Amino acid sequence: QATLLWLRRDLRLSDHPALCAAVARGGPVIPVFILDPLTEGLGAAPKWRLGLSLADLAQRIEAMGSRLILRRGAALDVLRDLARDTGAGAVYWSRAYDPDSVARDTHVKAGLKEDGLDVQSHLGHLLFEPWSVETKTGGFYKVYTPYWKALRDRAVPAPDPAPAHIPAPETWPQSDDLSDWGLGDAMNRGAEVCRPYQRVGEDAAIGRLGWFTGEAIAGYDTQRDLPAADGTSGLSENLALGEISPRRCWHAGLRAMQDGKPGAETWLKELVWREFAYHLAWHTPRIMRDNWRPEWDGFPWNTDEDDPQVIAWKQGRTGIPFVDAAMREMYVTGKMHNRARMIVASYLTKHLLSHWRIGQKWFEDCLTDWDPASNAMGWQWAAGSGPDATPYFRVFNPETQATKFDPDGTYLRRWIAEGQSQPSQTALSYFEAIPRSWKLRPDETYPDPVVGVKDGRARALDAYENRGF
Ligand code: FAD
């Protein structure tokens, strides 16, 4: 009897416990990806990036004599149809932890079990199950440092190799054509602009991990905060889609630490921030949409997405160079340096007093490394409304941040064309990428700040005081 392997954010072949279990079960394995309503609802950039990943995975699976079956519809209906058509007796997948996926998966699991199928979910997206990490009193962690201390010495099983062979069924069920799905339709800047910045698929991710943990990790402590440097792993897009497993990353980082490479432990801590985001999403699903700290409910944040200041923020035209450079970087590359994410999020929620959900949603539309849990945690951290957040009264100063982390202005020149006699190609590419309706030109005068650095800070602090914080 065949096993259906339902792929989601685990688009790889190695270190894939659900795949290994499906192969070990004996009988043919039918890998399937479903364009279900949750996936249909992805933002423009992550949806487009998903299409690249699926194309790569389909090729890799074919090279092993198997196929990736693509189907569109509600997950339970599709899996039921497939199980009936193929005579499959089991459905396996890797667990997801964000509340929308959990709700879907719970429904699917109950339905398939009713049908008498063997249904199994496996650990694959995280190092540890969120419920397996408990405080001494049996609760979950709300603060990162004790969470890290609880985990850092835990054994992480070594990554599994890819199976040598994925047994194929005698006849394959019908599959959609990936090109008919139009995953890139909402992305106005995919193939030409954004594609060169993507590192797609398992081979590319494993190659990058090898380079990073072999060489660059030693400089991670000093380089990781410099947005102009190639000083971080850049693996977030691969981790977000599961093109590489966190266990593989963990073990590579651990080996680098054992080899005495100075930045390795700091990097392992970053992988654990990702875990922490899922720990929080699992234990407090409200983090995805509501203020994690209820005392922020009713705070008079601006919620108007069409506010001219918010539009200026989205377009990278706030008149604050570091903020604008970062927003343009994201628009063109689909990614943004972590320091820059903190600064633009602080500027939106504090200087512009706009709701963090506006930023969360714009990132969701623009990031090719979009991850539901890390994005929600990052925004609530920046706004001050989240657990273990930056203190609400800490308002990043984007000018001193630029002086400190981009001292020679390389990052600003890379992304801002206005006022430069010979703007860089990257800075110009932003203007080539934007929709016509934005009506921005590289030879215009660079705008004055929509909200000045000092004024915005004072206004935010006043607003906090008025709320009695
Ligand atoms: P590295 O520095 O090489 O770190 C290795 C890995 O650790 C990353 O790939 C990532 O998976 C994880 N990681 C690192 N920092 C964090 C962090 N602060 N929180 C959670 N995980 C982390 N990350 C996403 O993957 N997707 C998002 O949608 C996302 N949205 C964010 C929004 C805001 C407002 C903020 C402040 C941060 C957000 N982050 C998000 C976290 C972080 O900015 C990125 O993970 C990081 O920039 C990715 O670069 P890298 O792969 O080179 O990371």
Image (tube, rainbow, N blue to C red):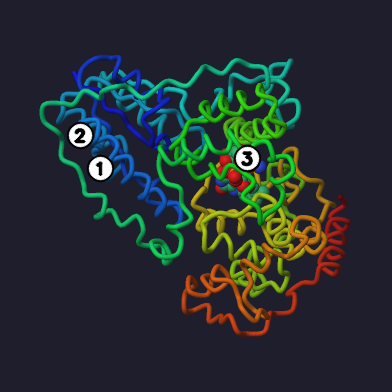
Q: Residue at x 60, y 76 (%)?
A: 423
Q: Is residue 387 above or below residue 188?
A: above
Classify the position of ligand 1 by quadrant: top left, top right, bottom left or bottom right.
top right
Q: Residue furthest bottom?
A: 444
Q: Earlier in the sequence, mark 2 or mark 1?
A: 1
The image position of residue 380, as x and y in percent, is 68, 47
Q: CA distance from mark 2 to mark 1?
A: 10 Å
- Residue 281 appears anywhere in the view: yes
Q: Secondary structure at mark 1?
A: strand
Q: Quadrant of residue 254?
A: top right
Q: Which residue is mark 3?
A: 216
Q: Secondary structure at mark 3?
A: helix
- Residue 379 appears anywhere in the view: no
Q: Which residue is mark 2?
A: 81
Label 2 Cα crowd, 10 Å radius (few <14 / some 14-19 / many 20+): few
- Amino acid type assigned to the residue bearing label 3 in the image: Ala
Q: Residue furthest left?
A: 171
Q: Residue at x 73, y 16 (%)?
A: 137
Mark number displayed over residue 71: 1
Q: Earlier in the sequence, mark 3 or mark 1?
A: 1
Q: Quadrant of residue 164?
A: top left
- Tell me the mark number nearer the camera, choosing from 2 and 3: 3
Q: Earlier in the sequence, mark 2 or mark 3?
A: 2
Label 2 residue near ligand 1, CB within 8 Å: no
Label 1 Cα crowd, 10 Å radius (few <14 / some 14-19 / many 20+): many
CB within 8 Å, label 2 to label 1: yes
Label 1 residue near ligand 1, CB within 8 Å: no
> Which one is nearer the viewer's eye here, 342 or 304?
342
In the image: residue 89, left or right of residue 10: left
